[in-house]
Image (spheres, rainbow, N blue to C red):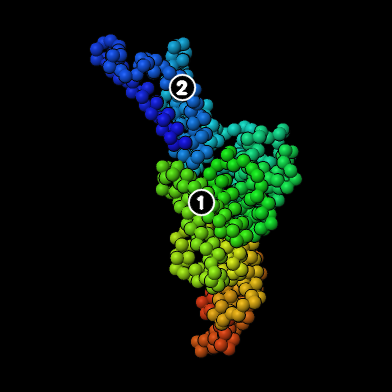
């Protein structure tokens, strides 16, 4: 794509340079500049070449160039095409009015006019959002103000996606697809965009079962498909949901379907390649793992080369995907090694490389990202419920702080279930492992209590957080408090809960008691 755009720019540069040179020559010599044909090595005169190039460029609409550049991730170039297209239309209109002597006062304000006429405003706002120019995006939204309900809903959904408001975007897409809110059938292009947007929001919010159910229902509307097939547009989202859920039988049917990927963008091909890789790891097929990782890297690198031309910030998600693929590659080798797989996996996840990478990445407000989601799936395949629970706990904590309480409650429930499953492992466990699981369960209860308090259920929050904390603790002296802490944090030689977690529970309950008016400051 970049080669095609470079060729178009070069041809346009030749035309503009030739016209400018002739104009300068005519001004200097008071006559039109003629080309010395004897010194020209081309078989065509310059006038004919110039005419053919201009005719070729006129046959390539700038709006088509903008759409193509957007599909391959070249957002800055796409926005440039749209701006030039709008200015060209306004200039052509002004020149036409000048020839007819019908220029109005508004036409004389050419440089002050808003250059948004005759272009795809939906695409323009999407590009501005991708480039983090939210002020201009809002201005264009105010200028456009579409009257049709479906157009307004599509704009609202796109804008909320740009701001990371996945719940709001999900509601807008649901309204857009609701037949009761539409006077007629939604056009195919808008319907596909709404369906893909709905599935994208569900994936971001972690509602993976809903993704599979919705994808199945959407595909059933296509009469050309068999009952168990998914359409090419929906298949990547269903594939990601299947491997993240660990539904390997569903993933097997998805990755083995015959479908045409020529019309898919780079991100969709990446989702399919990663899905095949995870399926191959589960089926212990090292050759297919290598092929899947190679295809996934090619998709990421094609997107990265385009994003790097816009800004370094846009390159970050693709660099994170490369880190993800590196982790998948290493852990797949652990699964295929002759050594004890479980011990090798635990050794790797306990290394500084594994911990430092998760510290450097930036989760979104849902508390997750591509690396965390992949680690969850790999931990499930390795049968490491304690590690899986730790990841769910981190997701729940960040989602609660971001105000996504449904996501947080689901994640904390998953964390609690994973830690409870860690007790049922057949392998022998040491005291340190028991302490880690017990302390983690205490942290889950603390986060769940904070969640209940945030939604107004203070009594439930206090019941969760005040477990085994006596009311007399506020009258204890230092020696009695030390004795109580030692009793609560140890059972013989086994540590049950860290002093830090117990102290956090006590201090948090104290704060809620005072702020809720249940106890006065003097009593505390």
Q: Which mark is residue 294?
A: 1
Q: Residue furthest left?
A: 29
Residue contact between numbered discs 2 and 1, judged by CB atoms under 8 Å: no
Q: Residue 81: x percent and y percent? A: 46, 31
What residue is drawn where x is 68% and y is 45%? 230
Few, some or many residues within 10 Å of mark 2 (<14, 14–19, 20+): few
Q: Nearer the viewer, residue 370 or 290?
A: 290
- Position of residue 270 relative to residue 9, above or below, is below
- Position of residue 24 relative to residue 248, above or below, is above
Q: Which mark is residue 202?
A: none
Quadrant occupied by the C terminus: bottom right
CA gap, disc 2 and disc 1: 38 Å
- Position of residue 375 relative to residue 475, above or below, is above
Q: Nearer the viewer, residue 510 or 491?
A: 491
What residue is drawn where x is 39% and y is 18%? 49
Q: Residue 16: x percent and y percent? A: 36, 23
Q: Residue 154: x percent and y percent? A: 61, 39
Q: Nearer the viewer, residue 468 or 190?
A: 190
Quarter of the figure with residue 393 = bottom right
Q: Nearer the viewer, residue 177 or 298?
A: 298
What element does badge 2 sit on?
Answer: helix
Q: Residue 299: x percent and y percent? A: 51, 46
């Amino acid at each position: 794509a970049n080669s095609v755009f470079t060729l178009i720019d070069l041809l346009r540069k030749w035309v503009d340079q030739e016209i400018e040179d002739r104009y300068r020559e005519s001004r200097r010599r008071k006559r039109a500049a003629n080309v010395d044909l004897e010194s020209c090595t081309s078989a065509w005169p310059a006038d004919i070449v110039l005419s053919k190039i201009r005719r070729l460029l006129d046959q390539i609409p700038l709006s088509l160039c903008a759409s193509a550049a957007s599909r391959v991730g070249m957002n800055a170039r796409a926005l440039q095409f749209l701006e030039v297209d709008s200015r060209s239309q306004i200039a052509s209109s002004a020149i036409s009015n000048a020839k007819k002597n019908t220029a109005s006062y508004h036409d004389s304000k050419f440089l002050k006019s808003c250059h948004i006429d005759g272009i795809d405003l939906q695409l323009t706002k999407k590009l501005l959002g991708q480039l983090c120019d939210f002020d201009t995006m809002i201005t264009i939204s105010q200028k456009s103000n579409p009257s049709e309900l479906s157009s307004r809903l599509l704009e609202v959904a796109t804008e909320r996606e740009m701001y990371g408001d996945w719940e709001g975007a999900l509601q807008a897409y649901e309204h857009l697809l609701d037949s009761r809110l539409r006077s007629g059938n939604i056009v195919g292009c808008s319907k596909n965009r709404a369906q893909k947007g709905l599935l994208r929001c569900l994936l971001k919010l972690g509602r993976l079962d809903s993704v599979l159910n919705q994808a199945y229902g959407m595909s059933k509307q296509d009469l050309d498909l068999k009952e168990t097939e998914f359409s090419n547009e929906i298949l990547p989202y269903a594939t990601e949901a299947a491997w993240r859920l660990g539904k390997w039988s569903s993933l097997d049917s998805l990755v083995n379907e015959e479908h045409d990927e020529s019309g898919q963008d780079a991100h969709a091909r990446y989702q399919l390649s990663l899905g095949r890789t995870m399926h191959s790891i589960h089926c212990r097929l090292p050759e297919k793992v290598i092929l899947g990782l190679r295809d996934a890297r090619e998709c990421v690198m094609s997107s990265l080369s385009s994003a790097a031309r816009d800004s370094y910030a846009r390159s970050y998600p693709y660099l994170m995907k490369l880190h993800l693929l590196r982790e998948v590659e290493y852990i797949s080798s652990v699964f295929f090694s002759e050594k004890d797989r479980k011990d090798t996996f635990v050794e790797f996840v306990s290394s500084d490389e594994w911990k430092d990478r998760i510290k450097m990445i930036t989760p979104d407000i849902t508390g997750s990202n591509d690396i965390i989601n992949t680690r969850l799936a790999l931990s499930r395949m390795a049968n490491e419920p304690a590690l899986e629970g730790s990841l769910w706990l981190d997701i729940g904590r960040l989602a609660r702080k971001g105000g996504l309480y449904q996501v947080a409650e689901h994640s904390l429930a998953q964390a609690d279930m994973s830690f409870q499953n860690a007790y049922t492992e057949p392998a022998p466990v040491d005291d340190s492992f028991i302490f880690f699981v017990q302390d983690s369960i205490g942290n889950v209860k603390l986060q769940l209590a904070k969640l209940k308090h945030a939604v107004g259920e203070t009594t439930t929050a206090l019941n969760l957080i005040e477990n085994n904390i006596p009311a007399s603790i506020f009258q204890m002296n230092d020696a009695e408090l030390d004795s109580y802490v030692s009793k609560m944090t140890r059972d013989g030689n086994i540590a049950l809960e860290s002093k830090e977690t117990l102290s956090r529970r006590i201090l948090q309950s104290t704060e809620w008691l005072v702020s809720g008016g249940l106890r006065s400051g003097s009593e505390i």
